[in-house]
Image: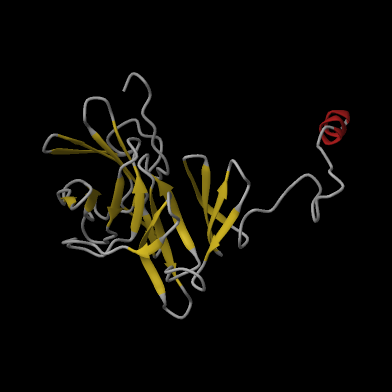
Amino acid sequence: AWLLALALALVPYPASSPGVPGWRNLTNGDAVTGIGDHAGTIWAGTNGGLVSVEGATGAIRYFTRANSDLTSNSIASLFVTPEGDGWLKLNTTPSGYGGGIARFDAASGSVADFEFPALPFTPEGLLQDNLRRAWLAELWWSRPGRLAMWEGASWSVLQPPDSVVSGLRVSAIAEDPSGNLWVAVYPWVHIGQRVGGGLVRKSGDAWISYTPEDSGLPSWFITALAVDLDG
């Protein structure tokens, strides 16, 4: 108990801060779904729109359907590439409006819906790998969904074979130093039955699956991936 009291005593309580002392609310909405940074500016996706906070000045900007080209204020995920390209996955509103993918320019702050050149499927998931590349994933029940990597002007589409996994809901992607692509698959639970799940590796043209049934993988439910220095 005395350790807790000591920790609380060390928290600053500026008299000028409204609301909860020592904290400044920078977001819009009540949930933060993604954070990225570029050139000292922090970008946050929330369920109330997009927020930017300039590190040097502390200036805050809010982007919503009312003052930008966002089609939905509810942002499912966000990341920013090293070049300053921002990616947003938007949730569909209860009235069926919005959804899809949007892009923003971290330098200018402009936000716009993103047109998908020659993409052969409707994306359901937006991910960033450990090399900070943008990926889109297709959700499919009866076969593995497709994956697409943005190459700057077009999409490189990958189609895992049916034998890899029955149903693909990608939760994370990473590439190791040898160029192998690792895909974490989070399963669906449909009518009490698990569909898909586990880990998939693409090595050259070969796709290899790892599950609790055929490897030492401890769970079907994989939510994140990381590559250490040894690969």
Tell me which residue sits at (64%, 53%) in the image.
26
Residue 201 vertical position relative to residue 104 in the rendered view, above or below: above
> Does the image show residue 192?
no
* Quadrant of image for the N terminus: top right
Q: Position of residue 73 (x, y in %)?
A: 50, 67
* Quadrant of image for the C terminus: top left
Q: How is the image coloured?
A: secondary structure
In the picture as drawn, the residue positioned furthest to the left comes out as 205
Number of residue marks: 0
Tell me which residue sits at (24%, 53%) in the image.
166
In the picture as drawn, the residue positioned furthest to the bottom comes out as 95
Q: Is residue 220 left or right of residue 55?
A: left
Where on the picture, by quarter, is residue 120?
bottom left
Q: Position of residue 5 (x, y in %)?
A: 87, 33
Residue 92 vertical position relative to residue 53 in the rendered view, above or below: below
Near-viewer residue (116 or 179): 116
> Does the image show residue 34?
yes
Q: Is residue 168 left or right of residue 203?
A: right
Near-viewer residue (186 or 205): 205
Q: Is residue 160 left or right of residue 65?
A: left
Residue 230 vertical position relative to residue 52 in the rendered view, above or below: above
Q: Is residue 40 left or right of residue 138?
A: right
Q: Position of residue 8 (x, y in %)?
A: 83, 36
Near-viewer residue (50 or 185): 50
